[in-house]
Amino acid sequence: MENLASHELDKYRRNFLRVLIYYEDLNYELIEEEPLYEPVRFLSDIGGTMGLFLGASALTFVEILQLVLELILFIKHKN
């Protein structure tokens, strides 16, 4: 390695920047994002909701049939 001339050494000393970095803590925190709904849970919720609506629809259909039957019997016994 060549010896630097004193004027070159002065030039490097004047253009040198010293940075001190202090870390409060050397640990790190890993932050991960996860989906709120997984596909299996999503399909399960859709199936449960469909079952609820279909069950309510079937129950409503049976109640309508019962109402029609009771109306027919009421009209028949009234005459």
Image (spheres, rainbow, N blue to C red):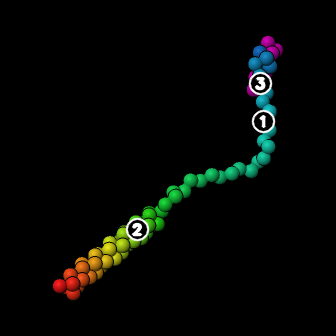
Q: Is residue 53 above or below residue 24?
A: below
The residue at the point 21 percent across, 84 percent down is 78
Q: Is residue 11 left or right of residue 48?
A: right
Horizontal and vertical percent position of residue 25? 78, 47
- SS at circle 1: loop
Q: Nearer the viewer, mark 3 or mark 2?
A: 2
Please, what is the three-letter code of the amino acid marked with disc 2? Thr
- Residue designated by label 3: 17
Viewport quadrant of the N terminus: top right
Observer able to see residue 61: yes
Snapshot quadrant of residue 10: top right
Mark 2 → mark 1, Cα distance in angstroms: 57 Å
**Is 5 covered by the magenta stretch?**
yes
Q: Which residues are magenta?
A: 1-10
- Disc 3 is placed on an element classified as loop
| Amino acid tagged 3 | Leu
